Amino acid sequence: MLTITLDPFKQLAIQRPVESAAPPPARPLSAGFGLLAERPGARLHERDLSLILADRVIVRKLGSSFGSIVEFYTKLSPEFSIQGLWPSRPTLGEAPIISPARPAEHTLPERDAVPFVMAIRKLIEVEQLVAAREMLAVAPTHILTDPLVARLRSILAPPVVKRVQKRDVDRTREYEWLGTNGHKYHGRWVALDGDRLLAVASSLRELREQLRTVAAIRPPLLHRVD
Amino acid sequence: MLVRPDGTEFTTGRSRFFDHPPGSSERTPKIFVKIQAESIDGVVFAQLDTGAPWSILDAEVAETLSLLGRMGEPKRISTRLGDFNGHLERTLLILIADEGESVSIEATVWVSPDWPGGTFLGYGGLLERVRFAVDASDNFFYFGPM
């Protein structure tokens, strides 16, 4: 169930495949990437972001969201600094942004998902659902298949609401029964059909097992009396 | 069920809600609506809590829906009952109507085997895509898809 540590960020490291859990090794960068080179003492996400920013394909994909991404990181990690990156960085509208071009499929391994996942998890932690969705929406396409990113996309997807042709009956009699008799079953699960007590159990599982032997005309109301 | 001034639907179904915890000695008014889920052969109450960032499922309900053994997104929550570690999971719930049409909601809910409270319907991941209204005079909960 819960893993060894309950800290989501530590779980991230635990749940990832070994090869991708390791911090990204220092990557040789061409002269053009001088200011993006790994700085001593840089944290994992800081280095990863630098690698992402170094890729012209990704920078282009981020487009106007690029500023938001950087803003996210800056907010999430006050010590994060992009000073030194900007002076030599062309504006987003310039092309080519960074050269030489490299085939997109070879430029960024899955480890580039790590900073996104960490940042999004940080937003979830502080209940910033909208911001988390916005950030996920600008994730580079090549990391969308990463299991952690895929899971976040599923979890953060807006709810899907559809009409269904299903109806219940008025449960006033059940409610009244609970008001009158509920105190006798404190801490227990009860199954009611109108004012008829169908089953009582100490767990929902046990209650459902009991109900298999009960002929009920309609779905019963299942309730744990607190 | 409820219509807008221009005649278009606002909600499509309604159910009676209960404003006190059923069978409980606590008398603080709340709104309890009825929900169903695929694996539960019955109806259970869920407390409407628009202030909650996530919906929370009763631990035994979550177990019945096989949501506790999954590796969902880890999430720690702080509640009046304390802090709890759990996971965010995706599941299908039904807001069941007494009249009109019910709605199924593929929602994100928080679950934990340690959660001692009941089931809550929160805004994020569930109510955010539901049109709803409360008629406190007759205890009717109106709802429909957006």
Image (cartoon, coloured by chain):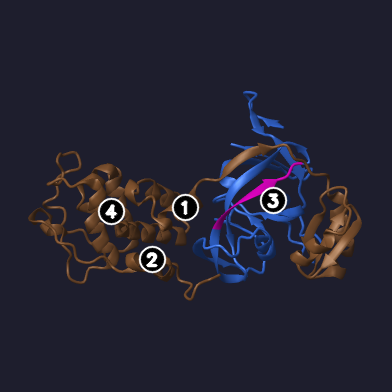
Chain colours: A brown, B blue
The answer for how far apart the CA atoms under marks 3 and 2 are is: 33 Å
Residue pointed to by mark 3: B38
Q: Position of residue A14 (x, y in %)?
A: 42, 70
Q: Residue furthest left?
A: A31
Q: Are marks 3 and 1 in contact (CB under 8 Å)?
A: no
- Amino acid, disc 4: Val
- Give the number of the disc on residue A17: 2
Q: Is residue A118 magenta?
A: no
Looking at the image, which is closer to me, B61 or A42? B61
Looking at the image, which is closer to me, A186 or B40? B40
Disc 4 is placed on an element classified as helix
Residue pointed to by mark 4: A70
Disc 3 is placed on an element classified as loop
- Give the number of the disc on residue A129: 1
Q: Are marks 4 and 1 in contact (CB under 8 Å)?
A: no
Magenta stretch in the rendered image: B89-97
Specify whether residue A84 is in view.
Answer: no
Q: Is residue A14 above or below residue B27?
A: below
Image point (58%, 65%), residue name = B69
The answer for how far apart the CA atoms under marks 3 and 1 are is: 27 Å
Q: Position of residue B78 (x, y in %)?
A: 55, 67
Q: Chain of mark 3?
A: B
Specify whether residue B105 is in view.
Answer: yes
